[in-house]
Image: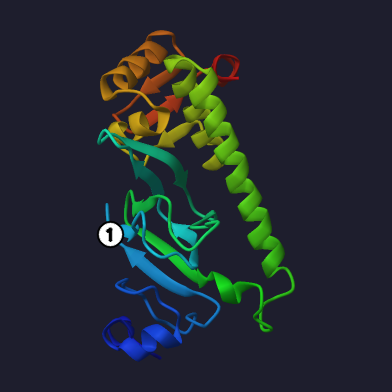
Amino acid sequence: MLTPSAVTQAPHLHRLFNIPPGRKAEASEHATQAGVPMSFGRNAEIYAEGETSGYVYKVVSGVVRVSKLLPDGRRQISAFHMSGEMFGFEANELHHASAEAVVPVKVIAFKWEGVLTMDRQPVNFVREILNLTMLGLRHTQDHLLLLGRKNALERLAAFLLDMNARMGGTPVLDLAMPRHDIADYLGLTLETVSRMFAELKELGMIRLESARRVHLIDKARLKAMGA
């Protein structure tokens, strides 16, 4: 079995396993031409805006943020991707945004041009890819609606409910992302996000155990506010 260092240090193995240039891979008996397990530390870059695309990624564990720097220097986070979700799809040969690990992340990288042509893939593999792509599109549509039609309090309520649904419906959210990430995702300032958390707490809808550990006390009122 190949060790991670063997794959990382040998250029020909990067070509063999279709590992994106400059990325660290974890090689194992599961590493095949269909997909390569890869690990990234907290805040590590998975790919950069303007970098050549050609790979798609499935999150195994952790949370990935996709963001873009605006001309005035501000950052807009367009998506958070969690376990089981896919990202990195592009309409052309370049990435239009950057992807980074919010916390330590494990992903599987797939060379896109080979995904649909490999004769060794399970029959349901392409269907899974398409389903995950459509799920990502739905999240994008919901995010655009959130930014365009909701006020600050409604945006935060909708965000917490979205995280709740994607984390299995647990009433206690352990948010991986810091508040400045949440602010950049919701199109708000950090101060506004902190104020909205305090307001939801005062309204009795949530309880804050810490900055990132949030108890959803009244999901019905949150749903009414975030709808």
Image coords of residue 170 (percent x, y): 52, 36
Image coords of residue 122 (percent x, y): 70, 76
Position of residue 133 in the picture relative to residue 71 (left or right): right
Residue depicted at 40% across the width and 33% down the height:
185
Judge whether 180 appears above or below 83 on screen.
Answer: above
- Name the foreground residue: 55 vs 6: 55
Position of residue 120 in the picture relative to residue 207 (left or right): right
Q: In the figure, residue 27 lies in which quadrant?
A: bottom left
Q: Residues within 10 Å of mark 1 (few under 14, many from 20)?
A: some
Q: In the figure, residue 211 lies in which quadrant?
A: top left
Image coords of residue 196 (percent x, y): 37, 16
Circle 1 sits in a helix, a strand or a loop, which is it?
loop
- Name the foreground residue: 193 vs 205: 193
- Name the foreground residue: 31 vs 51: 51
Residue depicted at 28% across the width and 32% down the height:
180
Q: Which residue is mark 1?
A: 41
Judge whether 132 appears above or below 152 on screen.
Answer: below
Q: Quadrant of the N terminus?
A: bottom left
Position of residue 38 in the picture relative to residue 9 (left or right): right
Q: Quadrant of the C terminus?
A: top right
Judge whether 57 appears above or below 187 on screen.
Answer: below
> Looking at the picture, which amino acid does disc 1 mark?
Gly
The answer to whether residue 93 is seen in the rendering is yes
